[in-house]
Amino acid sequence: MIIPLSYNLRNIRARRMTSALTVLGLALVVFVFVAVLMLARGLEVALVSTGSDDNVIALRKGSGVEVSSAIDRNTAHVLKVQPEVLTRPDGRPVAATEVVVLITLPKRSDGLTSNLTVRGVSEESLRMRPQVRIVAGRMWRPGTSEVIAGGAIQKRFRGCGLGETVRFGMRDWTVVGVFEAGGSGFESEVWGDVDQLMPAFHRPVFSSLTLKMRDPSSFEAMKARVESDPRTLVNLFREKQYYADQSKYLATFIRVMGLAITGIFSFGAMIGAMITMYAAVSNRTAEIGMLRALGFSRQSILICFLIESLVLAAVGGLLGVCAGFFMQYVSISTTNFSTWSEIAFSFALTPDIAAKGVAFALAMGLAGGFLPAVRASRLDLLQSLRAA
């Protein structure tokens, strides 16, 4: 026979304080666990959404990031005329040459400096990235020392707010607009006219070339041909994969460090659950004897106490996930290990992360409740009845 679930719920209500403390302990651990996964996922979402499925980015052979790449104009011309590159009705290829450099600016909060990405773009760059839109101010005027700042950095760095002036490249630049880019990594950059930024930084070559393909499925053929061409000396990457790779090291670091800390916390939570269940066994010795006398087997007693522990764990897990839900409204910034520049992103909760959080709570509940449940199932019938 199986002991009714109502018996477990009644006993949990009878021990409100200890049950509540156990649930809160489990919820705290699940919250930390979920927050770590949300943090890593938020970084990946921010960078992956930066790229497009039908865009290809070209970097100098051996360069893993744009800041260390260099593509001259002759190489750019060869790449633009590849048959896989989409062309406009007037015959012009859909391609954008860009320059990317790192500058150092102080933060508004504490005055400490951090690296910031400045991207020189052309009119074609803006057309290829429809997610970029001005939300305050206006676009820069070509041929002037004007720039626009991503929405994620305008309040974080001095000089990056609308109407402010920031100095880099031996010139003063006026921020005339603030843009958003669908939460992508572009929102952590300053954009300006490539023809103004290249001479300002004494860059005679481009950092990267982004091409739009006619058919994304032809990428591998184009990649094999271009990378074997001695005239180009470049590597081609799918734009989305390129930005996804940039998040790999930092996201892995966040997961490893965060899960290590969560593991320590989870050990404490399991000890707390174990103490709670041992106390429940000690206080209900007579009840356990009565259940045995009524014909319930040792296995039924074992399952009963495991279910009770799992119920507490499930409630704690759900509370932890619910607390994690509100972290989606928090935005943080850190240094991307791949580019060594500042990137801002938000926590991202997915159904998969929520399910992992609840499963983690149930695992802690099972581990913490197993030994007390075994002890309850092994209590001697006569001794239990004498305790009554």
Image: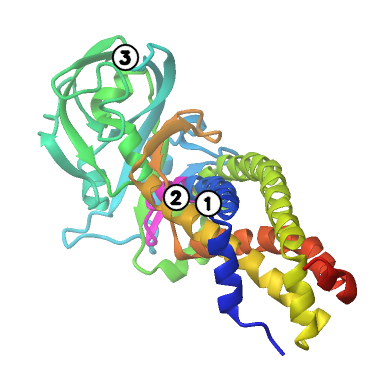
Q: Is residue 209 left or right of residue 39?
A: left
Sequence-first disc among 1 and 3? 1
Magenta stretch: includes residue 261: no
Let me know if residue 45 is in the magenta part.
yes
Position of 160 with respect to 53 (left or right) is left
User: Measuring 33% from the left and 32% from the top, which residue is drawn there?
Assistant: 189
Instruction: Tell me the CA gap for discs 1 and 3.
Output: 40 Å
Residue at 49% x, 51% y: name it. Answer: 41
Residue type highlighted by circle 2: Gly
Label 2 sits on residue? 324
Tag 3: amino acid: Phe
x then y, percent, for residue 193: 23, 30
Of the residues tagged 3 and 2, which is closer to the observer?
2
Report the disc number at residue 256.
Answer: none
Q: Nearer the viewer, mark 1 or mark 3?
A: 1
Establish if 226 lies above or below 138.
below
Highlighted magenta segment, given as a residue range: 41-57
Query: Which element carries disc 3, helix, strand or loop?
Result: strand
Tag 1 residue: 34
Q: Is residue 379 visible?
A: yes
In the rendered image, the quadrant that contains the C terminus is bottom right
Q: What amino acid type is highlighted by mark number 1?
A: Val
Residue at horizontal 58%, vertical 57%? 15
Q: How many marks?
A: 3
| Depth order, front residue of 234/338 | 338
Calculate the distance from the C-alpha at mark 3 to the C-alpha at mark 2. Answer: 39 Å
* Identity of the residue drawn at 56% across and 54% down: 23
Do residues under tags 2 and 1 come within 8 Å of each other at their CB atoms?
yes
Marking on residue 168:
3
